[in-house]
Amino acid sequence: MLIGHYAVGLAGKRLVPSVSLGALFLACQWADLLWPTLVLAGVEHFTIRPGITAVTPLDFQYYPYSHSLLALLVWGILIGLIYRAVTGSPWRAAVVLAALVLSHWVLDLIVHRPDLPVAPGLTPRLGLGLWNSIPATLAVEFGLYVAGSWLYLKTTVARDRIGSIGLWALLLFLALVEVANIFGPPPPSVTAVVIPAEALWLLVVWGYWVDQHRQQRV
């Protein structure tokens, strides 16, 4: 799940128009922003097993602190509280951001094989396995993406060319990355996965930048 997560972030703008798209991206992708750093630190780990699913060759063996249900619940509460403390925004913004953090686990549950932990230290792992079908994965992810993009466009309007071109470039870039991830060759190493994954932070910055050049529709 990639653009499906960003779809939820885009849609979140409808609920909290005052919150930047960058903050919404950070929340909905917090698990994947945290994960590569924990892998590099040796706290979490995975291997590459081509064919383990039709969509991704990654075998997520241990990632309870970035991707378990309990961990994301705690992370969501913390991020919501920090956002409210720093910005002074209403509780509604904090609640939506917390929900977006938790939404990552819910969406991953749909696509992952049974590898998602419920809590650190617990054996049962869950996953409905949509990644076993490329057509179904594309249908669900791009369906969510179109809906989320439409809601964001219905909520905001460009103030200048950056707000227009920058947004469409962002939406196109995410779609291309999704296609490349699904149809590209397996990565040659774990490092070849986690180093580019750290670049997801740039999408948070991109979200902030674009959103500064857009305003709420009247």
Image: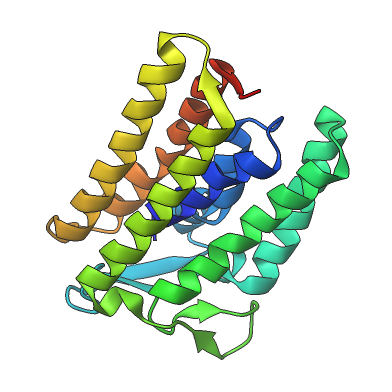
Residue 211 lies in what quarter of the image?
A: top right
Q: Is residue 66 visible?
A: no
Side (left or right) of 77 relative to 111: right
* Most distant residue in the front direction: 218
Q: Position of residue 208 (x, y in %)?
A: 55, 25
- Whether residue 111 is situated above or below residue 41 in the rendered picture: below
* Most distant residue in the top direction: 160
Q: Quadrant of the N terminus?
A: bottom left
- Whether residue 123 is situated above or below residue 127 in the rendered picture: below
Side (left or right) of 121 relative to 1: right
Residue at 26%, 79% (x, y): give it: 132
Residue at 23%, 42% (x, y): give it: 176
Residue at 48%, 54% (x, y): give it: 5
Q: Quadrant of the C terminus?
A: top right
Residue 23 lies in what quarter of the image?
A: top right
Q: Position of residue 7 (x, y in %)?
A: 47, 49
Residue at 45%, 41% (x, y): give it: 150
Side (left or right) of 170 relative to 103: left
Q: How many marks?
A: 0
Q: Nearer the viewer, residue 213 or 129?
A: 213
Q: Nearer the viewer, residue 190 or 203?
A: 203
Chosen colour scheme: rainbow
Q: Position of residue 117 (x, y in %)?
A: 56, 79
Q: Position of residue 180 (x, y in %)?
A: 19, 50
- Whether residue 86 is situated above or below residue 91 in the rendered picture: above
* Most distant residue in the left direction: 185
Q: Is residue 90 visible?
A: yes
